[in-house]
Amino acid sequence: MKNGQLTKPDIPSTWKAMETLYDSGKARAIGVSNFSVKKLQDLLDVAHVPPAVNQVELHPSLQQPNLHAFCKSKGIHLSGYSPLGKGPKSNILKNPVLDTTAAKLGKTPAQIALRWGLQMGHSVLPKSTNTARIKENIDLFDWSIPEDLLANFNEFKQERVVSGTQYVSKTSPGYKTTEELWDGE
Protein backbone atom coordinates (compact mmCIF):
# COMPACT_ATOMS: atom_id res chain seq x y z
CA MET A 1 0.00 0.00 0.00
CA LYS A 2 1.29 3.45 -0.90
CA ASN A 3 -0.52 6.72 -0.22
CA GLY A 4 -3.64 4.73 0.69
CA GLN A 5 -3.58 2.86 -2.63
CA LEU A 6 -3.01 -0.84 -3.18
CA THR A 7 0.15 -1.43 -5.20
CA LYS A 8 1.51 -4.42 -7.04
CA PRO A 9 4.30 -5.97 -5.01
CA ASP A 10 7.82 -5.76 -6.36
CA ILE A 11 8.41 -9.49 -6.05
CA PRO A 12 11.98 -9.60 -7.46
CA SER A 13 13.22 -6.87 -5.07
CA THR A 14 11.44 -8.40 -2.10
CA TRP A 15 12.85 -11.83 -2.93
CA LYS A 16 16.37 -10.43 -3.33
CA ALA A 17 16.11 -9.01 0.21
CA MET A 18 14.90 -12.39 1.48
CA GLU A 19 17.79 -14.13 -0.28
CA THR A 20 20.18 -11.76 1.51
CA LEU A 21 18.73 -12.92 4.85
CA TYR A 22 19.05 -16.54 3.74
CA ASP A 23 22.63 -16.09 2.50
CA SER A 24 23.64 -14.38 5.77
CA GLY A 25 22.30 -17.32 7.80
CA LYS A 26 19.56 -15.24 9.43
CA ALA A 27 16.91 -17.44 7.78
CA ARG A 28 17.16 -21.20 7.31
CA ALA A 29 14.50 -21.22 4.61
CA ILE A 30 12.45 -18.67 2.71
CA GLY A 31 9.08 -19.08 1.09
CA VAL A 32 6.08 -17.40 -0.43
CA SER A 33 2.35 -17.27 0.09
CA ASN A 34 -0.51 -17.25 -2.42
CA PHE A 35 1.76 -17.65 -5.45
CA SER A 36 0.24 -19.03 -8.64
CA VAL A 37 2.21 -21.13 -11.12
CA LYS A 38 2.89 -17.95 -13.13
CA LYS A 39 4.12 -15.98 -10.12
CA LEU A 40 6.31 -18.90 -9.04
CA GLN A 41 7.81 -19.29 -12.50
CA ASP A 42 8.46 -15.55 -12.73
CA LEU A 43 10.19 -15.72 -9.33
CA LEU A 44 12.22 -18.81 -10.24
CA ASP A 45 13.44 -17.02 -13.36
CA VAL A 46 15.23 -14.40 -11.20
CA ALA A 47 15.91 -16.27 -7.93
CA HIS A 48 19.18 -17.87 -6.95
CA VAL A 49 17.48 -19.41 -3.88
CA PRO A 50 14.19 -21.09 -4.78
CA PRO A 51 11.31 -20.82 -2.33
CA ALA A 52 11.16 -23.73 0.09
CA VAL A 53 7.40 -23.46 0.51
CA ASN A 54 4.31 -21.88 -1.03
CA GLN A 55 1.51 -21.41 1.49
CA VAL A 56 -1.85 -21.29 -0.29
CA GLU A 57 -5.52 -21.98 0.29
CA LEU A 58 -5.71 -25.73 -0.14
CA HIS A 59 -8.50 -28.15 0.78
CA PRO A 60 -10.76 -30.70 -0.95
CA SER A 61 -12.83 -27.85 -2.46
CA LEU A 62 -9.72 -26.10 -3.82
CA GLN A 63 -7.31 -28.88 -4.74
CA GLN A 64 -5.15 -26.82 -7.14
CA PRO A 65 -3.74 -29.80 -9.08
CA ASN A 66 -1.73 -27.68 -11.56
CA LEU A 67 -0.07 -25.74 -8.75
CA HIS A 68 0.55 -29.00 -6.86
CA ALA A 69 2.24 -30.60 -9.89
CA PHE A 70 4.33 -27.49 -10.60
CA CYS A 71 5.52 -27.17 -7.01
CA LYS A 72 6.34 -30.87 -6.84
CA SER A 73 8.37 -30.63 -10.06
CA LYS A 74 10.36 -27.69 -8.64
CA GLY A 75 10.87 -29.09 -5.13
CA ILE A 76 8.63 -26.45 -3.52
CA HIS A 77 6.55 -27.71 -0.60
CA LEU A 78 2.85 -26.79 -0.60
CA SER A 79 1.36 -25.82 2.73
CA GLY A 80 -2.39 -25.42 3.02
CA TYR A 81 -4.01 -22.68 5.02
CA SER A 82 -7.75 -22.95 5.59
CA PRO A 83 -7.49 -26.75 5.14
CA LEU A 84 -11.03 -27.21 6.46
CA GLY A 85 -12.41 -24.82 3.85
CA LYS A 86 -14.34 -22.80 6.37
CA GLY A 87 -15.35 -19.31 5.47
CA PRO A 88 -18.33 -16.97 5.44
CA LYS A 89 -19.71 -18.50 2.23
CA SER A 90 -18.44 -22.08 2.45
CA ASN A 91 -18.23 -25.02 4.77
CA ILE A 92 -16.88 -28.07 3.00
CA LEU A 93 -17.22 -30.08 6.19
CA LYS A 94 -20.87 -30.58 5.24
CA ASN A 95 -19.91 -32.16 1.90
CA PRO A 96 -21.42 -35.66 1.46
CA VAL A 97 -18.05 -37.11 0.35
CA LEU A 98 -16.50 -36.10 3.68
CA ASP A 99 -19.52 -37.32 5.64
CA THR A 100 -19.56 -40.72 3.92
CA THR A 101 -15.80 -41.18 4.20
CA ALA A 102 -15.83 -40.14 7.86
CA ALA A 103 -18.63 -42.59 8.66
CA LYS A 104 -16.81 -45.46 6.92
CA LEU A 105 -13.53 -44.75 8.73
CA GLY A 106 -14.93 -43.78 12.13
CA LYS A 107 -13.44 -40.28 11.89
CA THR A 108 -14.85 -36.75 11.73
CA PRO A 109 -15.27 -34.81 8.47
CA ALA A 110 -12.55 -32.41 9.69
CA GLN A 111 -10.12 -35.30 10.20
CA ILE A 112 -10.90 -36.58 6.70
CA ALA A 113 -10.26 -33.13 5.15
CA LEU A 114 -6.96 -32.78 7.02
CA ARG A 115 -5.86 -36.33 6.22
CA TRP A 116 -6.66 -35.72 2.54
CA GLY A 117 -4.17 -32.83 2.57
CA LEU A 118 -1.48 -34.95 4.19
CA GLN A 119 -2.02 -37.78 1.71
CA MET A 120 -1.68 -35.29 -1.13
CA GLY A 121 1.74 -34.40 0.28
CA HIS A 122 0.81 -31.00 1.73
CA SER A 123 1.21 -29.73 5.24
CA VAL A 124 -2.05 -28.50 6.74
CA LEU A 125 -2.51 -25.54 9.08
CA PRO A 126 -5.86 -25.81 10.87
CA LYS A 127 -6.79 -23.19 13.45
CA SER A 128 -8.63 -23.91 16.68
CA THR A 129 -8.75 -22.76 20.27
CA ASN A 130 -10.92 -25.71 21.30
CA THR A 131 -8.82 -28.34 23.13
CA ALA A 132 -10.94 -31.26 21.91
CA ARG A 133 -10.65 -30.11 18.28
CA ILE A 134 -6.92 -29.58 18.60
CA LYS A 135 -6.54 -33.18 19.82
CA GLU A 136 -8.81 -34.37 17.00
CA ASN A 137 -6.73 -32.42 14.46
CA ILE A 138 -3.56 -34.17 15.67
CA ASP A 139 -5.06 -37.67 15.37
CA LEU A 140 -4.17 -38.03 11.69
CA PHE A 141 -1.02 -40.09 11.49
CA ASP A 142 -1.92 -43.70 12.27
CA TRP A 143 -4.53 -44.18 9.55
CA SER A 144 -5.13 -43.24 5.93
CA ILE A 145 -7.96 -42.81 3.45
CA PRO A 146 -8.10 -45.87 1.16
CA GLU A 147 -7.61 -45.23 -2.57
CA ASP A 148 -11.21 -46.18 -3.45
CA LEU A 149 -12.54 -43.52 -1.06
CA LEU A 150 -9.86 -41.01 -2.06
CA ALA A 151 -11.10 -41.22 -5.67
CA ASN A 152 -14.40 -39.68 -4.53
CA PHE A 153 -12.63 -36.41 -3.75
CA ASN A 154 -12.74 -35.68 -7.50
CA GLU A 155 -16.46 -34.95 -6.98
CA PHE A 156 -15.80 -31.78 -4.98
CA LYS A 157 -16.89 -28.55 -6.64
CA GLN A 158 -13.75 -26.41 -6.75
CA GLU A 159 -14.09 -22.94 -5.24
CA ARG A 160 -12.07 -20.48 -3.20
CA VAL A 161 -13.04 -19.63 0.36
CA VAL A 162 -10.58 -16.72 0.36
CA SER A 163 -11.62 -14.71 -2.70
CA GLY A 164 -8.88 -12.09 -2.52
CA THR A 165 -11.25 -9.20 -3.22
CA GLN A 166 -9.64 -7.19 -0.42
CA TYR A 167 -6.40 -7.16 -2.43
CA VAL A 168 -7.81 -5.75 -5.67
CA SER A 169 -9.08 -2.35 -6.74
CA LYS A 170 -10.02 -1.09 -10.18
CA THR A 171 -8.69 2.37 -9.24
CA SER A 172 -5.34 1.35 -7.70
CA PRO A 173 -2.08 0.74 -9.54
CA GLY A 174 -2.01 -2.81 -8.13
CA TYR A 175 -4.12 -5.81 -9.10
CA LYS A 176 -7.37 -4.71 -10.78
CA THR A 177 -9.31 -8.00 -10.56
CA THR A 178 -9.18 -11.30 -8.68
CA GLU A 179 -8.50 -12.99 -12.04
CA GLU A 180 -5.34 -10.90 -12.31
CA LEU A 181 -4.44 -11.52 -8.65
CA TRP A 182 -4.74 -15.30 -9.01
CA ASP A 183 -3.48 -15.34 -12.63
CA GLY A 184 -6.65 -17.11 -13.72
CA GLU A 185 -5.95 -20.12 -11.48
Image (spheres, rainbow, N blue to C red):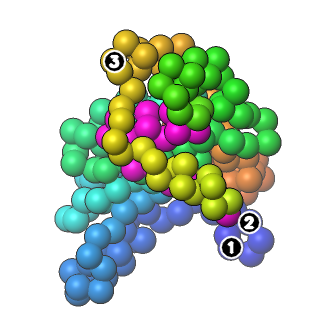
Identify the residue at image location x=77%, y=71%: 4
Mark 1 neighbour class, 10 Å CA radius: few under 14, some 14 to 19, many 20 or more: few
Residue where numbered disc 3 is placed:
147
Q: Amino acid at mark 1?
A: Lys
Identify the mark nearer the N-term, 2 or 3. Answer: 2
| Residue in view at x 36 percent, y 32 percent | 144
The answer to which of 110 and 51 lies nearer the viewer is 110
- Rounded to the nearest whole Å, what is the CA distance between mark 2 and mark 1? 5 Å
Label 1's element?
Answer: loop
Residue 157's quadrant in the figure?
Answer: top right
Give the residue number, with chain letter if any, for mark 1.
2
Mark 2 lies on residue: 5
Q: 81 and 134: which one is in front?
A: 134
Report whether residue 185 is seen.
Answer: no
> Is residue 77 in sight in this rendering?
yes
Assess whether mark 1 and mark 2 are in contact (beta carbons under 8 angstroms): yes
- Viewer-nearest residue: 149 or 136: 136
Up the image or down, 6 lies above or below 66; here it is below
Q: Position of residue 43 (x, y in %)?
A: 33, 55
Q: Is residue 4 magenta?
A: no
The local secondary structure at tag 3 comes to helix
